[in-house]
Amino acid sequence: MHFKTIFKSLKNKDMLKRFLIILGILFVYRFLAHIPIPVGDVSTFRDAVHNLINSTDFGSFLNMISGGGLTSFSIILVGLSPYITSSIVVQLLTKAIPSLEEISQDGETGRRKINQWTRIFAVPLAILQGVVYIHLIYQSIVGSATAVLPELTPLQWIIATTSMVAGSILLMWLGELMTEQGIGNGISMLIFASIVSGFPTLFSQLVAALLNTSAGTLSLFGWLNLPVNPTWFWIDLAFVGAIILIVYILVKLNEAQRIIPINYAKRVRGNSAYGGIRSILPLKLISAGVIPVIFATAFLSLPALVGQFILSRNADSVFAQNLVSLFTSPNADNFATFYPLGITWKWYIYPAAYFLLVFTFTYFYTSIIFNTKEIADNLQKQGGFIEGVRPGIKTAEYLEKIINRLNLFGALSLGFIALLPFISDYIFIILNGAPLGLSLSGTGLLIVVTVALENLRAIDSKALMVTYDDYGKETNY
């Protein structure tokens, strides 16, 4: 990264304007997260949403990528999840349907068509998700008997759903405005801002616990007492050290790739010679990114959501109670309720299933986005070949073998990252008898690191373009 060049590029008015536009959009995004949905008593709905989020891991994940839009019961409650789901579905359909794949390969025109279909498909998903959210939240309030709510009128349903759909579409538009600035993907930056917005809360939790000296103060070698909690001092120190180590590992995993050297045969056309050069084919260790984690989280949330829906109709259903208890992510908020006698065999079911699904979906998604036969055919058409490997089928088999090896380590790494919250909770359950309850996950860190690296590359590239003339003057002796 050319950080000196990036700072120098800010002297350019166009570059500075782009940065200010992005900062302004991020400010609008955070402002939208505090505009409540105009239906019923907002505080009552917020409490119900908080309970609903804590009951499912998918709810926590959606709240994370919506920047707290769920907990604040704001108009961006649905957030970017319909667009993300639509993007994944359209991407899968593009690989499964040949006609769609041809359109996607039709340059800029095809890309615009695919993007337009993605936006259109996201609207009914937002409507469906908005209706489901309102229903689950309303049933949660009625079922808990914490407040008396009248039955929602059709007009209230329309207003609530419309406001959430409008909020979701507005976020898509804001994301595209950020992308047009040419210094990063706007949707990724909004998700990045959503996750980072939770860091101050996490930091305040750590500081508040550290400064709570009701259990005593920290004594250094018997001659100096620091006004901090002795237990939390070591916890915070270990937490900061673990975060630095995890971020370092995530950067290495995200940047890790296998370089395949490609040779191009020399071709002669008339008096001109083409080819005869060497190139590379980089294969990323984790090609699927965080998509397998999202798939696994969504898949595991379905049984618990079904159980909650049954309980809203029949509170005495043993089957629904078992679904909720077995397929709800164990955390600090539900540990005392689900595991009053401490850790039992049920505690391990969700983490084990989570790991297996992440591992499986990593292989599944990579096989969809990385077509070894297509790559081998393209290399053969362009006159490229891997040294020691015959073009065509043998090249496809060779690439498939390498991808499977990379996937094995990549899937294990993604599974371990997804299990980090459960591992930390397990350690604190043994030491303290209950989970710590810090609002940070390995998945969130992975998204932050991935998006930060991608945007830094985009900013670096744009900065080099802006300062190209000055760079040439400095190097011209």
Image (tube, rainbow, N blue to C red):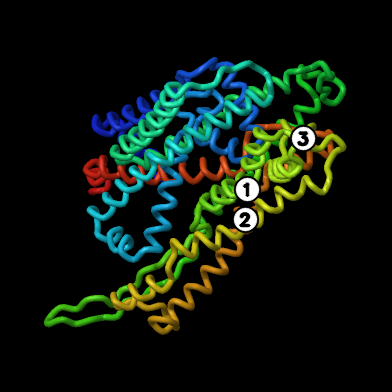
Q: Is residue 422 visible?
A: no
Q: Any mark on residue 357, and which?
A: 2
Quadrant of residue 100 within the rendered picture:
bottom left
Q: Any mark on residue 335, and which?
A: 3
Number of residues whose C-alpha sits closer than 10 Å to that of mark 1, classed few (under 14), some (14–19) or many (20 or more): many
Q: Position of residue 68 (x, y in %)?
A: 53, 28
Q: Looking at the rendering, in which quadrant would you find the N terminus? A: top left
Picture layout, residue 70 above or below residue 373: above
Helix, strand or loop status at disc 3 = helix
Q: Which residue is mark 1?
A: 300
Say which of 169 and 273 sits in front: 169
Helix, strand or loop status at disc 1 = helix
Q: Gap between marks 1 and 3, in whole Å?
A: 18 Å
Dot in front, 1 or 3: 1
Is residue 94 left or right of 229 when viewed as pictured?
A: left
Q: Are marks 1 and 2 in contact (CB under 8 Å)?
A: yes
